[in-house]
Image: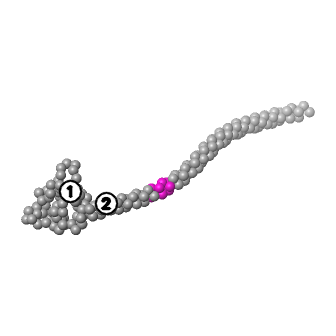
Amino acid sequence: MFYRSKDAAALYNVTPQTIGAWAKEFAEYLSSNANPGHKKQRLFTKEDMTVFSLVSDMQDNGLAFADMHATLKTGNRGEPPTIEPTEMQVIVANEHENRLTIENERLTRALVDAQQALKKAETELASLREVEDRNIKLETQLEGALTVKGELQNQIAQLQAKIERLALKTGEEFARGYVAGIQAKIQTPDNNKENSQGS
């Protein structure tokens, strides 16, 4: 049985892409199945895993690939995995299932949050629509009030014009009456004189 890239990645706490990079970098120390060619699955023996074990330890200690090559050329290797490939595949499958379960729970929470946010938004929208309806009614009332105001202003202007005409007419009549009164007084003394002379 062979270890897959996913198994190796889980064992050394790296990504499958990192395992692929290690397989290319250290190909001379690995079996032929470690680099099978384009779009073919990488498969690793227990001996391949001892190479990865050494690489992982040295990388954790901050050493460069050149140091790893030098160590591997001397024949040094890391510890082989204590977990068999079949067991590792079960662990990886369970981890994948756990990740899917966690992701499902996360998405479910996100969905519930989104539904609550939508409900809140719908409530706020309903309130805004009520405000909008009230505003429309108020605008209609305001337009009506402005129309009435305009009509009243026209009536006031007409009444003021009538009052001015009436005042002018009244003033003219008063003036005519006043003039007539003065003329009457003027004529009356002459008549009195004539009457006194005649008698």
| Residue at point 39%, 58% (across, down) | 104
| Percent x, y of residue 84 | 24, 64
Judge whether residue 159 can be spotted in this image. yes
Residue 108 vs residue 72: left or right? right
Left or right of 151 in this view: 77: left
Amino acid at dot 1: Leu
Helix or strand or loop: what does disc 2 sit on? helix
What residue would you read off at disc 1?
A: 43
- Does the magenta stretch mainly form a helix, a strand or a loop? helix
Label 1: element kind: strand
Looking at the rendered image, the quarter that the N terminus falls into is bottom left
Query: Residue 150 versus residue 142: which sits nearer the camera?
Result: 142
Depicted 30 relative to depicted 168: above or below:
below
Residue 114 sits inside the magenta stretch: yes
Q: Amino acid at mark 2?
A: Ala
Query: x, y percentage for residue 142?
Result: 60, 46
Q: Which residues are magenta?
A: 113-121
Q: Residue at x 65, y 42 (%)?
A: 148
Work out whether mark 2 precedes mark 1 in sequence or the reverse, and give the earlier one.
1
The answer to whether the residues at label 2 and label 1 have Cβ atoms under 8 Å apart is no
Question: Which residue occupies the foreground of this view, 97 or 60?
Answer: 97
* Image disc number at residue 93: 2
Task: Name which quarter of the figure residue 152 lies in.
Answer: top right
Answer above or below: position of 184 versus 21: above
Disc 2 to disc 1, C-alpha distance:
17 Å
